[in-house]
Amino acid sequence: MPLTSSFAAQSATSPLAPYEITRREVGPTDVQIDIEYCGVCHTDIHQSKNDWGASNYPVVPGHEIVGKVITLGSEVKYLKIGQRVAVGCFVDSCHTCSSCKADLEQYCLNGFTATYNSTTKDPGGFTYGGYSKSIVVDTHFVLTIPDGLDPAGAAPLLCAGITTYSPLRHWDIKSGMTVGIIGLGGLGHMGVKLSHAMGAKTVMITTSKNKAADAMKLGADEVLISTDAVAMNAMTNQFDFLLNTIPVPHDFNYYMPLLKVDGTMCIVGSVGPTAELNTGPLIFGRKSVADSLVGGINETQEMLEFCAKHNIVSEIEVIKMEEINYAYERMLKSDVKYRFVIDMNSLS
Amino acid sequence: MPLTSSFAAQSATSPLAPYEITRREVGPTDVQIDIEYCGVCHTDIHQSKNDWGASNYPVVPGHEIVGKVITLGSEVKYLKIGQRVAVGCFVDSCHTCSSCKADLEQYCLNGFTATYNSTTKDPGGFTYGGYSKSIVVDTHFVLTIPDGLDPAGAAPLLCAGITTYSPLRHWDIKSGMTVGIIGLGGLGHMGVKLSHAMGAKTVMITTSKNKAADAMKLGADEVLISTDAVAMNAMTNQFDFLLNTIPVPHDFNYYMPLLKVDGTMCIVGSVGPTAELNTGPLIFGRKSVADSLVGGINETQEMLEFCAKHNIVSEIEVIKMEEINYAYERMLKSDVKYRFVIDMNSLS
């Protein structure tokens, strides 16, 4: 029988409020998870408000999910009841395309199934996310949380963590390199921690002098104030890699001269039309602009192990479910250091 | 004593006409070259017309130079009088920066000296290019033309050839890969020949059905008409690499879905503001947009050897010096297959 679960859902006209939904039955390869914490990602706001014009109401947001196994499908061997697990941004993919075969499910050529607001054969027709008491997910897409990792602080690793970890790994960031993290928010603060832990000289690049002290506390070796033309000029050709976490359209060309020859800027913050590309700053150094989307399942597990080893979690503010609308308002004013996480026990 | 040489120069108000200029004396590491052929690059038009606002008149264009050694500096050991040599887009660099030390003089961090319209200590204060009877160049920047390579057809290899060869080599194009060459002009026709010779499946991507037959003759395995939405859609995720030779601002985002995961589009045609970057087509495949500038001296020599081995030269139309203004007019109408080359013996 399908399972029922209370959850917090949003429609175009109403704020988040608790409802009952029907989850699919636990199939042979499924895991049912009692959700303890769910991180709040900016995507949740976009989807709740239908900013991208593709929301299917009721939307149940949440793709930074941490909880405990409460039911195991008959074929699931490697997990135990009570084990702490996690779910990130997607819950299915085709398993057959070249991307899936290369452990890059996030680039599934047939399209992955997002953790919420994605078409599914499950009851309701669309996936429902982590602002909920429980969730049923195919075991392939269930991560395990290593011992010692704070479960609330770990929740944002499932999106903000892997979104920054994956490009840093792909572009082989390591000791001896200089990495610039542009923008200090949910993504940026994870970028600083991870780049630092990978051994790179890590420079926080921000418009705000007020963020300098925080950036240093998070692990930045230096802070570069991007509105200081003299300081920016002094750093020309100094960076092996730039991770651009600015969440809105902006003139990314401005930062390109910071890169060394053959350097890459990976934009992970702004999705969609961003600014006019000027090839001038690229051509005199064979520079690249790239983009990257979360990470594959194996890489996400690797990231969680890496974070456990280096004692890295997200800086968070834990809220109750009933505070979510207020949290959205604060996020829109960048008033959070650096990620809200919902204590799902607060959902009645 | 400084040398004199007749040359064809352009001012802001007058068309190209012959003048006398003073060349520097042949120093110990210099080579004086009797110019046989000089290719005509679109850059020549931009510089002649001061399109980039940086022209210093009189401008002597020309950076696709082939000729014979007529004078050798006392320290030049590896060349002989009468040997066929070539000069490309730059004639000096700092020799000390990380780029120069890595044989990437084109990315000299202190700025290379362009073959024309670049500041120099030589008489005149600015370099003068290849629309001339002779030129004096430091031996480090002098290439040798392998036996068997047609000297007129080889001239455009020094710019159009290396501009397409270098990115194809840098992104390691080889058998088993699928490469798209976008745009069939001076750069594009070299891109097709070189990509084909490197063993890649080479697809000409063009708006014009009329160019299909020519593209196949040049070595394309297929032609993709970019205005055919059905054909474009069928080629989604099929390309390892796109070499974009479109010489004007355009919506490059349109071509990004053609790339496989981790694919790169290298823009070599349009320099400067090109179009608004939409990160959407990049993020769902970790795709990159890059740019590349000609090639280093060693790589240019390698390219010439590669072309000799594979019997590749540019498709050209040889003109007399007096026809240059007419040639510029035709180039602006894309009426050339595929490069004009000036027979410098025609300069009186």
Image (spheres, coloured by chain):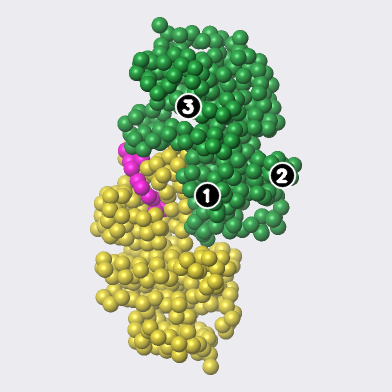
Chain colours: A green, B yellow
Q: Which numbered disc flags the more N-terminal residue, 2 or 1? A: 1
- The disc at residue B6 is none
Pick the residue in front: A129 or A173.
A173
The N terminus of chain A sits in image quarter: top left
Tell me whether the residue at label 3 lies in contact with that at label 1, contact meaning CB atoms closer than 8 angstroms: no
Q: Which residue is mark 1?
A: A174
Give the amino acid at mark 1. Answer: Lys
Residue stretch rendered in magenta on the structure: B234-244
Residue A324 in the image: above or below residue B278: above
**The numbered mark 1 sits on a residue in which chain?**
A
Mark 3 vs 2, N-terminal side? 3
Q: Residue at x 58, y 52 (%)?
A: A178
Q: How many numbered callouts?
A: 3
Disc marking residue A144: 3
Q: Quadrant of residue B309?
A: bottom left
Give the position of the C terminus of chain A as an image quadrant.
top right
| Label 1 secondary element | loop
Q: Is residue B271 above or below residue A9?
A: below
Residues at marks 3 and 2 touching, judged by CB atoms closer than 8 Å: no
Task: Tell me the kind of residue under disc 2.
Answer: Ala
Q: Position of residue A48 (x, y in %)?
A: 57, 22
Determine the residue positioned at 64% across, 57% down.
A235
